[in-house]
Amino acid sequence: MRVVNFGSLNIDYTYRVENLLRPGETKAAKSLAINCGGKGLNQSVALARAGACVYHASFVGPEGTFLVETLRESGADVQFIQTVPQSCGHAIIQVSDTGENCILIHPGTNGLLTMPYVKQVLSHFSSGDVVLLQNETNLVGQIMEAAVQRGMLVAFNAAPMDEKTSSYPLDKLKWLFVNETEGAALSGQTDYDTIAAALRNRFSHTNIVLTLGEEGCLYAGEEGYFRVPAFPVQAVDTTAAGDTFTGFFLRAVLDGQGPQEALTLAARASAIAVTRPGAANSIPRWEEVHSQMAV
C-alpha cells in the first residue's frame, strides 16, 4: 500500500529562548538554527524512516533544494515535487529551555497547488492507496474529495487549525489526527475522553487519533477505544513530535497492526524525537524505535 503526501515544505528558522515570548516582549535569542521543516516534510520523513512507501507531492521554491534532498535521503520518493519561481514556505519557531515551542508560518509555495497538478499526481495511484494531508497547504478539502472519488483512503492531520477546517469533508476520512487543542476546537468539548467521543459521533466513519502530550494518546474508531500513556523522557524540542507520531502510526496500521500496537509504536517514536533538537533531523528510524520497544 502506497502513501502520497500532499504536504508542506518549509525552511525553519529556529530560535532558542529561555521562555516563549509574551505579547509586546522583545528578547535576544540564545541561538539560531536554519533547517528543513514543514508538517508535510516531517511526516513524509517519518513515514519513510518507518519503512513506508511514501511519495511527496508539492511545489518548492528555488531555495528549497535541500528540502527535496532531505526527503530523498530519508527514503521518500520525490518524483512529483515541482520547482516554481516563488519562494518556499517558512516557519519562525521559538523553542524554550523546557522544550515547549510556538510556530509562525508563511505559506509561500505551499499555497500554490492547483487541481490539474493534484489530479495528475493522483492518476498514478489507485483504490486502497492512502492520501495524507495537513492544514499547511491549499486545496485540502478538494484533495480529500478527489482522493475519495478514486477509492483512496484519506488521513488528515488537522494542524494548524483555522476557520476552514470544519468545512472539510471530515466524515469521509479514514483517520483524523488531532491534538487536544485541535480536538477541542472541532468537538466543542474540553475533556479528552469527551473530545474523542464527540468527534467519533460527529464523524462516524472516521477513526479519531488524539495526541495528548505528556498524557499520552488515544484512539476512538471502528475497532473500539484504546489509550496509551506517554513514555517519560526529558524533552529537548517538541517541534516534530506530532509529525513523528503520525508517520509511525500510519506505517504501523498500514502494516496490519492494531490500534493499541500502532499507538504504542508511535508514542515511542515520538518520545525519541523530543529528546533531540530540530524537526526532521530528530525523527528516528524504524530499527531504532523497535530496538527501544524491546527494552
Image (spheres, rainbow, N blue to C red):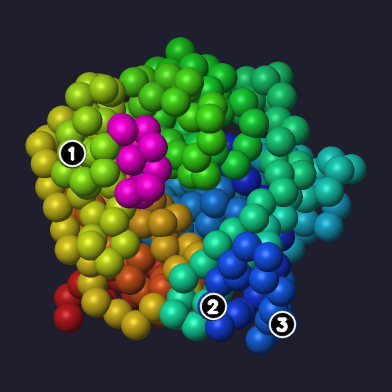
Look at mark 1 in the image and give the residue it sits on: 194
Query: Was residue 293 drawn as part of the magenta stretch in this picture?
Result: no
Under mark 1, the amino acid is Thr
Query: Was residue 187 drawn as part of the magenta stretch in this picture?
Result: yes
Q: Secondary structure at mark 1?
A: helix
For the record, the magenta segment spans 175-188
Look at mark 2 in the image and give the residue it sits on: 19
Residue 199 at what x, y percent from top left? Answer: 26, 31
Look at mark 3 in the image and give the residue it sits on: 28
Give the quadrant of the N terminus.
Answer: top left
- Identify the residue at image location x=36%, y=57%: 245
Q: Is residue 203 above or below residue 210?
A: above
Q: Is residue 88 above or below residue 234?
A: above
Classify residue 84 by image quadrant: top right
What distance separates the C-alpha of mark 1 from that of mark 3? 41 Å
Which residue is more in the foreground, 99 or 222? 99
Residue 290 at what x, y percent from top left? Answer: 26, 70
Which residue is more in the foreground, 77 or 136? 136
| N-terminal-most mark, 3 or 2 | 2
Mark 3 neighbour density, 10 Å: few (under 14) some (14–19) many (20 or more): few
| N-terminal-most mark, 1 or 2 | 2
Taking the image as drawn, is residue 72 in sight? Answer: no
Q: Secondary structure at mark 3?
A: loop
What distance separates the C-alpha of mark 3 from that of mark 2? 11 Å
